[in-house]
Amino acid sequence: MSSMYVMRMIDVIINLSGDAVRKAADFYKDPQERIIVLFDDISLAPGRLRIRKTGSAGGHNGIKSIIG
């Protein structure tokens, strides 16, 4: 079984990142379950990492546009 990993840094306004994520997913034919989104969260202490499979946007408009 082969795997391909793509790391993409979007170059759009963060509030519109959902469209860029959808276009990349369509291009690579990736289902939603295989997409991992990394972003900063001011509510976490520096150096802290939180990993969640589900959840809300927590007021982050860029994430809101992705899960939206």
Image (spheres, rainbow, N blue to C red):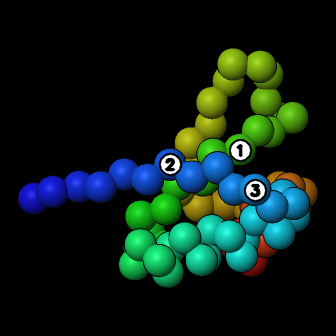
Viewer-proximal residue among 32 and 54: 32
Image position of 3 (left or right of 9):
left
CB within 8 Å, label 1 to label 3: no
Quadrant in the picture for the N terminus: bottom left
* Image spot of residue 50 (x, y percent): 62, 37
CB within 8 Å, label 2 to label 1: no
Mark earlier in primary sequence (1, 3): 3
Kind of residue at disc 3:
Asp
Residue on which disc 1 sits: 39
* Image spot of residue 16 (x, y percent): 83, 69
Kind of residue at disc 1:
Phe
* Residue found at x 47% / y 77%: 27
- Is residue 50 depicted above or below 27 in this figure? above
Give the Cα distance between marks 2 and 3.
13 Å
Image position of 29 (left or right of 42):
left
Mark earlier in primary sequence (2, 1): 2
Q: Residues within 10 Å of mark 3 (few under 14, many from 20)?
A: few
Kind of residue at disc 2:
Met
Q: Residues within 10 Å of mark 1 (few under 14, many from 20)?
A: few
Q: How many marks?
A: 3
Image position of 43 (left or right of 48):
right
